[in-house]
Amino acid sequence: MEYSKASYAPEDNLYQVSPVQGELRTRGPLNVGFQVTRRCNLKCVYCSEPPNLPDMNMQQIAYAFKNLKKAGVLKINLTGGEALLRKDLREIVDLSNKMGFHTAVDSNATLVTDEMADFLSGKLVYFETTIDGKPETHNRVRGKYDEVLRGATKIVARNIPLYVAVMVLGKSIDDLKHSLVVANELGASKVKFLSPIPKGRGKELPDEILNNDSLLELWGQLCEYVGKTDIKPQITLADWKKIGQGSVIIVNSDGSVVGGPSHGEDNCVTHLGNILEESVADMWKRYPHKLNHIRKYTGETMYIS
Ligand SMILES: C[S@@+](CC[C@H](N)C(=O)[O-])C[C@H]1O[C@@H](n2cnc3c(N)ncnc32)[C@H](O)[C@@H]1O
Ligand code: SF4
C-alpha cells in the first residue's frame, strides 16, 4: 500500500497531505493527544477527561511513542488531566523531541514555575492553555484565573508560542471577547474556540450549551471584532457538527486509544484498541473516521480567521 506524503507546518499548525490516486491515505493519525496522566489539580465543570484511569509508566510511554512513530504520527500534544502533575514530564518531553515528534503541551498553566518554563523553552511548537472568559466566569467553570495568567506569562516570556483555548459555553459574546483580548495582551499566537463535547463531566452540561444554535453567529461576531481591532492572534472555531465523528485521536493515560467526539456512541468516543497491545497502524486500517481526522488537521473542516 502506498501512503500519502504528510508534513506539519508549525507556523500555522496545519498539516499538508498529498493524495495517492485521489485518496488521502495516511499510515496512521497525523496528530495525537497523548494523556500523560488523568490526574488534575482543577475540577472544571465540563471536563471530558476525569481522573478515572491509571497512568502509564515511563517504559510504557517509550513503547507507545515507538508505536506512534511507526504509524507516521507527526505531532504529539502532551495532555491530560494536568500534564504538569507528572513528575517525569521533562523526560517525556525530551523523549518526544528526541524521537522527532513536533511536541506541544496542553495544560491548565496553573503549575508553571520559572524552572519549568525555562526547561520548556525551545522544546515546544506551542503551549496551550484555556481561558474561559472573564475572571468570574472562568473561576465559576474552571478556577484559578490569576494563576493561569501568571503561568501563561512565564511561557510567553521564554518565547514559547502560546495558544489559548476558549470553551463556548453559551450564547453571550462578552466572555469570548474577554478571552480574546486577554490572549492578545499575553502575546498568544492562536485562540481556539471550542464547542463543548458531551463526554465525562461534559455530559451533564445543559442542552442549550451542548447544542448551541448561536455558534456561527458568535463566530461571525468574533471575526468582525478581530477585523475592527488590532487583535493579532489567528482565531479558529471547532464546530464538531461540521468536523464530523471521531476526528481527534487520543491516547488515554492507560494506553487505550480513542477517537472523538463520536456523538451517539458510549461516552462520545470510538474505540481503536490499546497502544501497548497493538500497532497503531493496524488500528488505523480499520478506523472508520480516518478522513474526518485528516480533513480537520489539514484545516478543511475548521473555521479559521
Ligand atoms: C482535557 S483538557 C487537558 C489539558 C488541561 N488540563 C487543560 O484543561 O487545558 C484539554 C482541552 O480540552 C478542553 N475540554 C475539556 N472538557 C471538554 C469538553 N467537554 N468538551 C470540549 N473540550 C473540552 C479543555 O478546555 C482543554 O482546552
Ligand atoms: S479540563 Fe483540564 S484543567 Fe479542567 S479538570 Fe479537565 S483536565 Fe483538569
Image: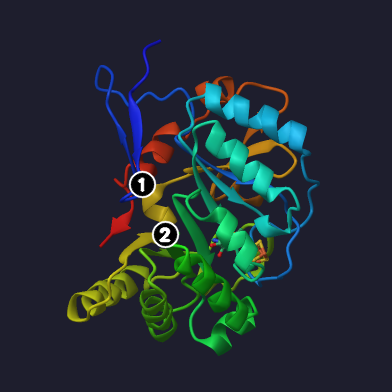
Looking at the rendered structure, the number of numbered marks drawn on it comes to 2
Q: Is mark 2 within 8 Å of ligand 1?
A: no
Residue density around tag 2, few if under 14, some if 14–19, many if 20 or more, within 10 Å: many
- At which x and y percent is residue 268? 60, 50
**171 to 300, vertically: above or below:** below
The earlier-in-sequence mark between 2 and 1 is 1
- At which x and y percent is residue 210? 52, 67
| Element class at badge 1 | loop
Mark 2–mark 1 CB contact (< 8 Å) = yes
Quadrant of image for the C terminus: bottom left
Q: Is mark 1 within 8 Å of ligand 1?
A: no
- The colour scheme used here is rainbow
At x 55%, y 33%, the residue is 98
Q: Quadrant of ligand 1?
A: bottom right
At x 74%, y 32%, the residue is 60
**Residue type for callout 1:** Pro
Label disc, if present, on residue 10 of the rendered structure: 1
Task: Residue lying at the far bottom in this picture: please name it.
Answer: 136
Task: State left or right for residue 216 relative to residue 87.
Answer: left
**185 to 238, vertically: above or below:** below
Task: Residue lying at the far top in this picture: please name it.
Answer: 1
Residue topped by disc 2: 161
Task: Residue lying at the far left in this picture: please name it.
Answer: 228
Distance from disc 2 to disc 1, alpha carbons, whole Å, reads: 10 Å
Closer to the camera in the image, 53 or 189: 189
Quadrant of image for the N terminus: top left
| Element class at badge 2 | loop
At x 40%, y 58%, the residue is 238
Residue density around tag 1, few if under 14, some if 14–19, many if 20 or more, within 10 Å: some
- At which x and y percent is residue 100? 49, 32
**Residue type for callout 2:** Pro
Is residue 237 visible in the rendered image? The answer is yes
